[in-house]
Amino acid sequence: MKLYFDCTSGVSSDMILNALTGLGADTGAAQRLRIEEEGHSQHSHGGHAHHHSHRSHREIRRLIEESELPQPVKDIMCSIYLVIARAEAKVHESDVENVHFHEVGRPQAIRNIAGIAAGLEDLGVQEILCSELHDGKGFIECSHGRIPVPVPAVMAMRETCDYVFATEDIETEMVTPSGLGVLMGIGAKYTEDMPRGRVVKTAVAKGGRDTGKEGLKAFLIEEGE
């Protein structure tokens, strides 16, 4: 069985999680992952205080390793976070172990990654493939302030992957660091065309940002003899 992602509407970790759920995968491991609300820092943007969990890569890896999740799920999660950590370390000129995550270090983001890892393990696919990835343009507001699209972490990842990217005439982010990090971390391979075979199940999933696009499309494909 193969899993194919059509990323022409962009990709994010919540889109991937929702797509896997739509395919019938058991993503319930996310609910079993206990994450303490610690490691917070407070800072201010425009006079407003914000509380964020700035966990380091080392802290997140320890959280994963000490959890009661099955080992294959832990391995997938660690692989995903390593990809993101390497990109963030390059952007911030830090070392991989101690680089601090912002958005992807929050409890819900960690649970999303846990759900993705559990879902993939549940589906038991032999190969994961993806189309070209479409991103937007312009600028977005994030914990680092106003940054250009593609965002710096995505740009760093693009330098180390073999995927094909295209730019949509849409003024927002469509490919997130967590989404690209998941694809790279799970070893998804680029393919120009959708794999041949019998489509067993499909799912379409949108993320938290409205881009006006249809959403991430996922296909479970059974290879023909």
Image (cartoon, rainbow, N blue to C red):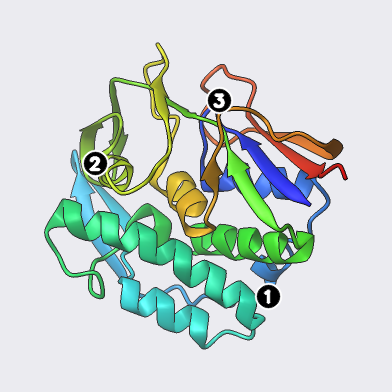
Could you tell me which secondary element the residue under label 3 belongs to?
Answer: loop
> Label 3 belongs to which residue?
9
Which residue is drawn at the image coordinates 30% and 49% (left, top)?
A: 160
Which residue is drawn at the image coordinates 77% and 65% (left, top)?
A: 122
User: Does 131 appear above or below 77?
Assistant: above
Nearest to the observer: residue 91 or residue 142: 91
Q: Are marks 2 and 1 in contact (CB under 8 Å)?
A: no
Whole-percent x, y for residue 198 in the image? 86, 37
Of pointers 3 and 1, the one earlier in the residue sequence: 3
Three-letter amino acid code at the position of disc 1: Arg
Q: Are marks 3 and 2 in contact (CB under 8 Å)?
A: no
The span from disc 2 to disc 1 (Cα, nearest Å) is 32 Å
Which residue is drawn at the image coordinates 48% and 77% (left, top)?
A: 36
In this view of the protein, can residue 168 be seen by the observer?
yes
Three-letter amino acid code at the position of disc 2: Pro
> Label 1 belongs to which residue?
32
Say which mark, if any, is on residue 11.
none
Could you tell me which secondary element the residue under label 2 belongs to?
Answer: helix
Please name which of the two marks, 3 or 1, marks the residue nearer to the observer: 3
Say which mark, if any, is on residue 152.
2
Whole-percent x, y for residue 177 in the image? 39, 46
Three-letter amino acid code at the position of disc 3: Ser
Whole-percent x, y for residue 26 in the image? 79, 61
Of pointers 3 and 2, the one earlier in the residue sequence: 3
Residue 5: which quarter of the image?
Answer: top right
The span from disc 3 to disc 2 (Cα, nearest Å) is 20 Å
User: Does 28 appear above or below 17?
Assistant: below
Nearest to the observer: residue 222 or residue 16: 222
